[in-house]
Image (tube, rainbow, N blue to C red):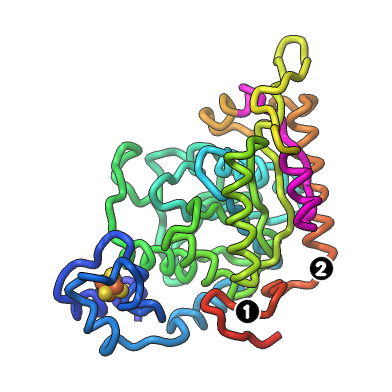
Amino acid sequence: MAPSQQVQDVESQLVEEAPEHCPGPQSELAGKQDACQGCANQEICSTQIPKGPDPDLPQIYTRMQGIRHKILVLSGKGGVGKSTFTSMLSWAIAADEELEVGAMDLDICGPSLPRMLGASSNETVHQSNAGWSPVYVADNLGVMSIGFMLPDDETAVIWRGAKKTGLIKSFLRDVDWGALDYLVVDTPPGTSDEHLSVTSLMKEVGIDGALIVTTPQEVALLDVRKEIDFCRKAGIKILGVVENMSGFVCPGCKGVSQIFKATTGGGAKLCEELAIRFLGSVPLDPRIGQCCDAGESFFDRYADSPAAGAILDVVDSLRDEVEGVADGGGSENGLDVDGLRIED
Ligand code: SF4
């Protein structure tokens, strides 16, 4: 059964639309969370809707089998340049012409990868018997995003939790990536329901791990600590932390000044404290934003810039980390998202 059909079947059993922070009627937490208190569906969700392993998992697993390395890009909060960094990471990995790369935009409420990677906003997703075809922005770089399914760039996605989860599952199950060396996944920020859905489903099908993006200020690092705690509890291997917007490079004189000065030691100190790999710092360069707006590769246009060098250093460290470890769920503590013990 298609995921959208399955979501409709569950939704048809509810007596009213699921509220905003609904954990999902099929979730083990259904009927028990704060959002469920006072919800008219509480009894139905607690007693009548079947729970257990997600029935779409085997198909998602099969779909992802041809992908050698899967990396989640996470951030504790919005505004740290997660999507920008995801686009840079995708361009940088795809600069190796021997690699096939996919970029999946699962940030449902703010899909920006298509524009950043140079896909036309008028692009429509083609569907075949094999599934939805990604849009190719280079010979070896494909992108898939909810943005391709919106009528225009200005349409807001105002959906409840269960519907968002259904779409995320459709993306994971129905996109025909074919054989890839790398799939880079831009996830919704924070620890929202969508974030939990993406991370738990991807972890179940086997990922290399998560790359966490932060900025140097303590206000961002505080949220990163929560994200790290979440990953550890969820059994998601942390590949490393990248500090974005770390200093400003003047495009004229190439001098570097600190705009968002680290007051508590920044990402490097945090990694040292928490025994996590620090993958590097990427300076703020206004030309990165210009390239993202124009959908151009920053590396093609400004290959000699300090920011391009810094990002390529991060990618080298990341590839060392990923290609030097075995594929798999990367569970650090052997626990899955719901606290259930998983088999190694
Ligand atoms: S899981 Fe069920 S009871 Fe809880 S918020 Fe969602 S619809 Fe309501």
- Residue furthest to the top: 252
The crowd level at tag 1 (other Cα within 10 Å; few <14, some 14-19, many 20+) is: some
Mark 2–mark 1 distance (CA, rounded to whole Å): 19 Å
Q: Viewer-proximal residue, 272 or 100? A: 272
At mark 1, the secondary structure is loop
The residue under label 2 is which amino acid type? Val
Q: Which circle, 2 or 1, is nearer the viewer? A: 1
Residue placed at 33% from the left, 68% from the top?
34
Give percent across and percent down for residue 249.
72, 20
Q: Viewer-proximal residue, 160 or 56? A: 160
User: Is 125 within the magenta?
Assistant: no
User: Is 281 within the magenta?
Assistant: yes
- Occupied quadrant, residue 11: bottom left
> Which range is magenta?
266-288
Q: Is residue 52 left or right of residue 156?
A: right
Which residue position holds label 2?
A: 325
Residue 309 seen: yes
Give percent across and percent down for residue 296.
59, 32
At mark 2, the secondary structure is loop
Which residue position holds label 1?
A: 335
Give percent across and percent down for residue 289.
57, 27
Q: Viewer-proximal residue, 23 or 132? A: 23
